[in-house]
Amino acid sequence: MRTRVLLLLILGACARPAPYGEPVRLVSGGSDTLVVNTRGPAPLNVRALDASGRTVRNARIEYALTGGDSLPLTADGVLTCAQPADLAVRATLGSIRKGIVVRCRPVEWLRVPGPVQFVLGDSALGGPRAFPVTAYGPDAKPVSLIAGTLSVRDAGVARFDGLALAPLTAGATLASASIGGRFAYIGVHVYRQVGELGALDTIMRIPPAHRLVAVPLHVAPGEMRRQRLPRGGWLITMLPENGDSLGGPQLRVEHAECSPVFGPRHYACTVGRDAAIVVYRSVDRTHSRAADAQLLVRWFAGQ
């Protein structure tokens, strides 16, 4: 009888869960594949977890190449991805092992065209859109397999929903991408829609941080509209950007010093007294119907 009792106690001890803080498994993010975009030495992101799913700190995980391409990998998991490669790695912690696939896709620089401009309430310009970041490798070709982080400086103006950037309220902020130790920043401008061009008379009543308005335009051939613009520094944009080639409304700013910025039909203007925005269309038999456009006006500096 004593022998049976002793045997049951031993079996019971073996069946108990591991003590809190003792590693029971290894994980590498949400899958068994790691993407590394850093060109220089970078640690592989494999973690040890205890029975409760918490990370075990200072776990001494050892790494070894088991297949695929051969790249410099240290025993403590620092990999140098100097070139595109695919390799198999085994991570070991005591009796715990985990095999992972590493995709080396080094990134040399990032490009984000912009700014990203939203118009609240507009069906085409007011909804979330994919953040326009492109990563390039050392060969100057786009890198399609990337892993990184996206962030917005002012979460009250816009936010990321997965990979899509969504507007929240009128204002300007910066959005950034971090991939492989490279960074790129771009302006995010969120405009609120107003009913007509005459609303610019009251734009200075809006707090400066929210002084971004969008005016929907419907202009017939031969029509011209003129609206006074308050003194200060203004970013003025006419959308769509290719409106000139489509016979759409044209833009002119009188009594102001304006310089092209960002792209077609984007201007930075220093406005003094008697300045005015003029929107017009020439008479053109090819484009005989009224055309739509959006005029975006953003204040950026006072005088």
Image: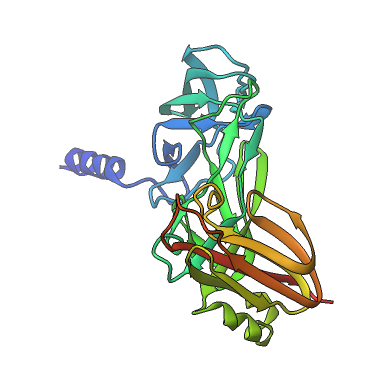
Query: Going 41% across and 49% down the picture, which residue do you hit?
Result: 19
Residue 48 percent across, percent down from the top left: 48, 40
Q: In this rendered view, identify the residue nearer to me: 76 or 93.
A: 76
Query: Going 43% across and 38% down the picture, which residue do you hit?
Result: 27
Residue 127 percent across, percent down from the top left: 42, 61
How many circles with numbers are drawn on the protein?
0
The answer to whether residue 117 is left or right of residue 292 is: right
The answer to whether residue 217 is left or right of residue 177 is: left
Q: Is residue 206 above or below residue 30?
A: below
Quadrant for the C terminus in the image: bottom right
Q: In this rendered view, identify the residue nearer to me: 81 or 186.
A: 186
Q: Is residue 273 above or below residue 175?
A: below
Residue 82 appears in the picture as rendered:
yes
Residue 154 appears in the picture as rendered:
no
Query: Going 40% across and 41% down the picture, which residue do you hit?
Result: 30
Quadrant for the N terminus in the image: top left
**Toward which corner of the image does residue 12 lie, by quadrant?**
top left
Q: Is residue 200 above or below residue 92?
A: below
**Toward which corner of the image does residue 151 lie, by quadrant?**
bottom right
